[in-house]
Amino acid sequence: MSLSDKDKQHVQSIWSKASGRLEDIGNEALSRLLIVYPWTQRYFGAFGNLTNAAAILGNAKVAHHGKVVLGALDKAVQDPEHITANYASLSELHSTKLHVDPDNFRVLGDCITIVLAAQLGTGFTVELNAAFQKFLDVVIAALRKQYH
């Protein structure tokens, strides 16, 4: 799947509206993933206490990794033509070293979308949402590349 110029413009629009809040969005999205989908916690054993929502929401390692995730997503927003190439090492890391179930990429993408929608409110229109979903499809396909 490729992104149209209009899709890229929409993703840039979302990202510009969210700029300045990316760290918070990353923390909230990763926290949501770990709380709502507790089986994903197995990949974060080194993060310490993840036993309940309060512990997850107050966990500095979760917050830091949420920032890392959104930083990686920012690279895809900034260079949408080379997402697959730019994500090759991340795909390799997640498939061969971390052994992350690739279905979790979609779940995290959904969490990011929910947080963006909540943060942006009516500014996250149906048209922007559709473009962002296409963008996430490309990113997720790139992350899953080493799994094939």
Image (cartoon, rainbow, N blue to C red):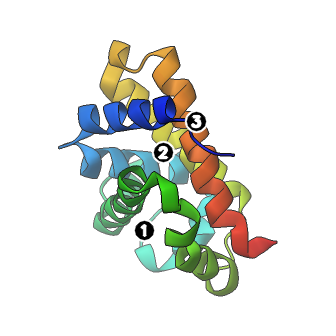
Circle 1 is placed at which residue position? 49
Image spot of residue 70 (x, y percent): 37, 55
Q: What residue do we see at 32% from left, 24% from top?
A: 120
Q: Residue at x 52, y 61 (%)?
A: 83
Residue pushed farthest left? 20
Q: Horizontally, is 18 left or right of 70 in the view? A: left
Indicate which disc residue 5 carries: none
- From mark 2 to mark 1, how far is it between C-alphas? 15 Å
For badge 2, the amino acid type reads Arg
The percent position of residue 42, horizontal first and vertical second, equals 62, 70
How many badges with numbers are in the image? 3
Q: In which quarter of the image is residue 135?
A: top right
User: Which label is found at residue 32?
Assistant: 2
Q: How far apart are the two marked residues, 3 and 2, measured between alpha carbons? A: 18 Å
Q: Quadrant of residue 61?
A: bottom left
Which residue is label 3 attached to? 133
Give the percent coordinates (x, y) of residue 129: 51, 26
> Callout 3: 10 Å neighbours few (<14), some, many (20+)?
some
Ranked by sequence position, the earlier of labels 1 and 3 is 1
Eyeballing the image, is 65 above or below 20? below
Q: Which of 110 and 7 is in front in this view?
A: 7
